[in-house]
Amino acid sequence: MSMVNAFSRADFERLDETERALIARREKVLGPAYRLFYEKPLHLVRGEGVFLYDAAGEKYLDAYNNVASLGHCHPRVVEAITRQTAVLNTHTRYLHEGIIDYAETLTATFPEALSQAMFTCTGSEANDLAVRIARHVTGGTGIIATELAYHGLTSAVAEFSPSLGESVTLGPHVRTVPAPDSYRHSPDEMMEKFGRDVAAAIADLKRHGIKPAMLITDTIFSSDGIFAGPKGFLKPAVDAIHAAGGLFVADEVQPGFGRTGEAKWGFERHDVAPDMVTIGKPMGNGYPMAGIVLRPEVIADFGPRARYFNTFGGNPIAAAAGKAVLDTIRIEGLQQNALDVGQYLMDGLRSLSHASIGDVRGSGLFIGVEIVADPAAKSPDAALTTRIVNGLRERRILISASGPNANVLKIRPPLVFSRENADTLVDALGDVLKGL
Amino acid sequence: MSMVNAFSRADFERLDETERALIARREKVLGPAYRLFYEKPLHLVRGEGVFLYDAAGEKYLDAYNNVASLGHCHPRVVEAITRQTAVLNTHTRYLHEGIIDYAETLTATFPEALSQAMFTCTGSEANDLAVRIARHVTGGTGIIATELAYHGLTSAVAEFSPSLGESVTLGPHVRTVPAPDSYRHSPDEMMEKFGRDVAAAIADLKRHGIKPAMLITDTIFSSDGIFAGPKGFLKPAVDAIHAAGGLFVADEVQPGFGRTGEAKWGFERHDVAPDMVTIGKPMGNGYPMAGIVLRPEVIADFGPRARYFNTFGGNPIAAAAGKAVLDTIRIEGLQQNALDVGQYLMDGLRSLSHASIGDVRGSGLFIGVEIVADPAAKSPDAALTTRIVNGLRERRILISASGPNANVLKIRPPLVFSRENADTLVDALGDVLKGL
């Protein structure tokens, strides 16, 4: 399985001299594990709000990047990072009020039971720590994830991140289940089926002598194809893992921090109670930071025995950046904006009424558009999806694609996206579809 | 095994009201896995050069923190981070010259064979990636590390980081060997013994049907008690792992970036050829960044199959910070300063000629002082070590301790440490020793 929307060496000759030289230098010094987006990669030099600018001065509407969730180079975050970087940068083995303030502000956005926070630098580290804790507290090792999940790339987390491709093998204690598919199943069916699939995975783990430790899901199934509704469909699956003595870990690295519009955290839309919640990407609007928010019971035994220290995790600058992000979401009403503009954008996408658009779904500013060859058969069209993604890129609008069949447009703009930006995107997509 | 130099709840009542309140808030929201340094924790608010300042305005000489290796809040790094944070922060799936420039500058400081770099956010992630690559390229799983090594805290890396304590179990495919001990063995003996121990670990892995994947060592054995010389003592061990088809990974997270004075990278002092080198802590003078530098042959098959993407790793700000760090080391001659002041400091420590000081060893500004009850018997004195560390803290000088018997003073100041700073430290230590 190759990466969706990756630049391929086959396209090398189509690039101009400067880009070819830069790519050659890059391949020489960064080696063969790195990928670039698009048939014609972007050479970026500047970002501001919803726009990115390339070396030639061209301006791109960013409808993809969920890290710079408040918009690129948001002044409040830039100011917070700049100020704290000049004052002090140490670690959590000294007392510092910043990290305590931030942890209190952060946990206050969660249901009361999720009252403690631990800080890492990446979502991978957060999910890796979740595995360590889950295994310690349950005494089990079994992990259930969805078929095309991505949870990170440490050795332990790559083992349950099947979207990394077949060369990265799943762990022997890992079982995968199909993501709930709202396009191909009725709401009742998808909910019931997902619960049944998780129950079957639990039974299969037990049959192999493996005690279940956790079920982990991205609560909007970002890499599985984006499945947002109907709200509540996670419940039977979460009930099943709890009944089996395992934990439920909500991976909010992508849906969290208000992106879904309807809630600050994706799991809240489903009215389920996670034991741990992992967070990351937009947490510092680009500053490297991530973490876990959890129920104190979960860490009560692990904590005293296996101390946790992350050199950079929870440093004073991360705390300042994280605080600025939470403040900005509140002050600028970005969760509400994500809800309003997201609905407006989905309405606009649906109004295109094009035969290739099989489904438009999502919540807030996390939207999937399923591209099909035949709407009646709901047959995925990956080739057409690639043409659309690259067609939009030629029109200077950035999105990507996702899903087991690489046929779901992934639209995930900064939360400051406006109705005007949404119109630009819908018009350009209409234009691309017309030209096919 | 409890953590060396950790604050204990037993000392809680000795603190003043403000600190107790802050610690109570901290424990409530960060949970039980976090630790604080010192019997009386430090509440820091500002850092500048070799000094840290607490909330009461007290000034501390920092002879411990190796992350802010250029000194706290070094203006060149602050400026680089500030500038780039306001311009663009994206990721490695777009072209950006900054990361390519930085990777070229970085790899140019390594021997020619180590020509490719990959970027993570933490040393843990770098060592975790090294494990994935080593296992892929060798087809083995066995790992050899030293008895009190610390390489990080992901699930896979914690398995070969015995310094995390007995609650964190070693992996079944992990073998540990005693660190080479220059205090208790002659140079020839220690070199020969370390090679023999590694060869025995390899044989034991094979006897259990486990193919060796790698030997990993911190090249100055930071948590094992700091063993710097004689130069060259790593060679027989590295030869043994290579002969067994495994890789040698030099963990330079602590000794790297010129700290040892004699070389930019610790492994160069031993004239051995690592297959991969992991780097971190001082890489961005506090900006969260780390990475691997490797031989292209090692990643040639893994790279195309198992793509690598780290959301924050190698972002334009990390590149700018990392470049500023390398520039500063060169412009300010910090490697040479580490060598000169390190030697001066070791001479000063030796001149104390106190019966409790069994050994003074190190390279550049990475120094270990072994504290013993009886110099003839070389018997470790952990209690005295704790009193010295906390005695220096009361005199507003920051160091810590290390080693399997928690009796080695760990002195690891910023590379801008001056002779005057060294005098202050030596005088204060003399004073503490006199008061015992």
Image: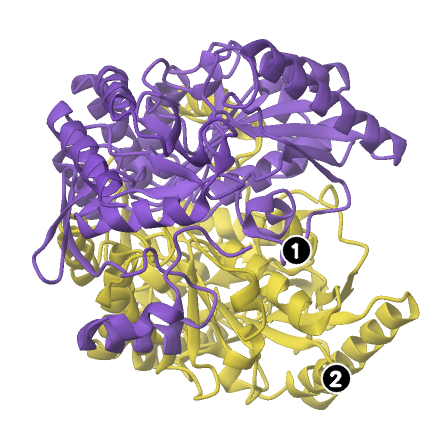
Chain colours: A yellow, B purple
Q: Is residue B380 above or below residue B241?
A: below
Q: How far across and how far down the image is residue A414, in percent? A: 34, 63
Q: Is residue B185 above or below residue B121?
A: above
**Direction right: furthest residue:** A207
Q: Is residue B98 left or right of residue A156?
A: left
Q: Is residue B104 left or right of residue A101?
A: right
Residue, x 52% and y 67% (percent of image)? A304
Residue, x 18% and y 28% (percent of image)? B422
Q: Mark 2 Cα within 10 Å, few/some/many (few <14, many 20+)?
A: many
Q: Is residue A241 left or right of residue B382?
A: right
**Labelled disc at residue A93:** none
- Position of the C terminus of chain B by quadrant: top left
Residue, x 20% and y 54% (percent of image)? A81
Q: Earlier in the sequence, mark 2 or mark 1?
A: 1
- Position of the N terminus of chain B by quadrant: bottom right
Query: As shown in the figure, which amino acid type bears the numbered disc 2?
Result: Ala
Q: Mark 1 Cα within 10 Å, few/some/many (few <14, many 20+)?
A: many
Q: Is residue A33 above or below residue A369?
A: above
Q: How far across and how far down the image is residue A165, in percent? A: 69, 47
Q: Quadrant of residue A144?
A: bottom right
Foreground residue, A349 or A1? A1
Marks 2, 1: nearer the viewer? 2
Q: CA distance from mark 2 to mark 1?
A: 21 Å
Foreground residue, A150 or B434? B434
Query: As shown in the figure, which amino acid type bears the numbered disc 1?
Result: Ser
**Labelled disc at residue A240:** 2
Q: Which residue is mark 1?
A: A161
Q: How far across and how far down the image is residue B204, in percent? A: 82, 31
Foreground residue, B110 or B173? B173
Q: How far across and how far down the image is residue A352, in percent? A: 48, 71
Can residue A101 be seen here? The reply is: no
- Determine the chain carrying the residue at label 1: A
